[in-house]
Amino acid sequence: MNVTLLDYGAGNVSSVRRALQRLGVASEGASKREQILAAEKLILPGVGHYGALIRALDEHGLREALLEKINAGTPFLGICLGLQALFETSEEAAELTGLGIFCGRVSMLPRIAKLPHMGWNTLQMRRESSLLAGISGSDYFYFAHSYAATPSPPPLDDSTVATTMHGQEFIAVLEQKNIYAVQFHPEKSGEPGARLLSNFLRLAA
């Protein structure tokens, strides 16, 4: 099994690659359109600024290729900014347009909470999830972010399978057909993170 990591020049590609290696899975970076179009499984790792990610996708002509692969059913996992990029826009760079796969806007978490939200937190499960198989609400995952997407109340939003609280409730895990995304960093989340990555690889097989 080989996994393609979308490398836009500012993501945490190396740490995700090491996490996959620990699972016995090879990966390769993709920074060109043709590499993305040839991918069988895609992961978009993301750290840093939303604007940097979106601009890099557009400047390197990667947006259309990424959307083409996702819409064609290629298994996709977005991590942190990789989740936020799936929405229409973000308050962090309001002048830019996201991938628009999910409706809504990413906003800053309330300042009543310590920002950035950095450290360990649990998930509140909304519904059963293939990506979260074997994972419970007592498992901790590593978060590092100040912006997040707010879930709509069910049943209006059935793509949100788990949320987390930090100042307010926000989307922690998305799952819709071949699209999976997490606001936290599974590659830095120990055994629960490794289980989640293993689940994605099994679903993508």
Image (spheres, helix red, strand yellow):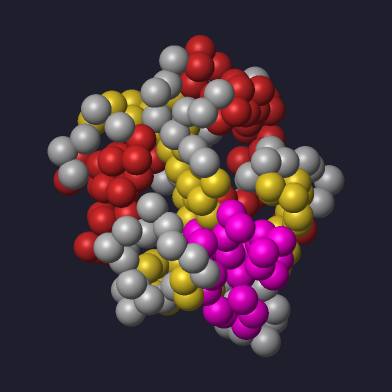
> Which residues are the magenta region?
145-173
Residue at x-position 50% and y-position 17%: 37
| Residue 11, image x, y percentages | 47, 43
Q: How many marks?
A: 0
Q: x and y percent of residue 21 in the render?
A: 20, 40
The image position of residue 39, as x and y in percent, is 42, 21
Report if residue 38 is visible in the image: yes
Identity of the residue furthest to the top in this view: 34
User: Looking at the figure, which quarter contains the N terminus?
Assistant: top left
Residue 193 as seen in the image, left or right of residue 184: left
Q: Position of residue 66 (x, y in %)?
A: 58, 27
Which residue is located at x 33 percent, y 72 percent? Answer: 136
Q: Say above or below: 167 vs 57.
A: below
Residue appearing at x 79%, y 42% in the figure: 96
Left or right for 81, reference 135 = right
- The quarter holding residue 75 reads top left
- Seen from the viewer's position, the closer of residues 102 and 24 is 102
Q: Quadrant of residue 2?
A: top left
**Magenta segment includes 197:** no
Q: Residue furthest bottom?
A: 112
Was residue 147 drawn as part of the magenta stretch in this picture? yes
Q: Is residue 169 above or below residue 57?
A: below
Q: Is residue 60 left or right of residue 190?
A: right
Residue 60 shows in this picture: no
Specify the quadrant that holds the C terminus: top left
Residue visible at 33% across and 26% down in the picture: 28
Farthest residue in the right direction? 95
Say left or right for 47 vs 140.
right
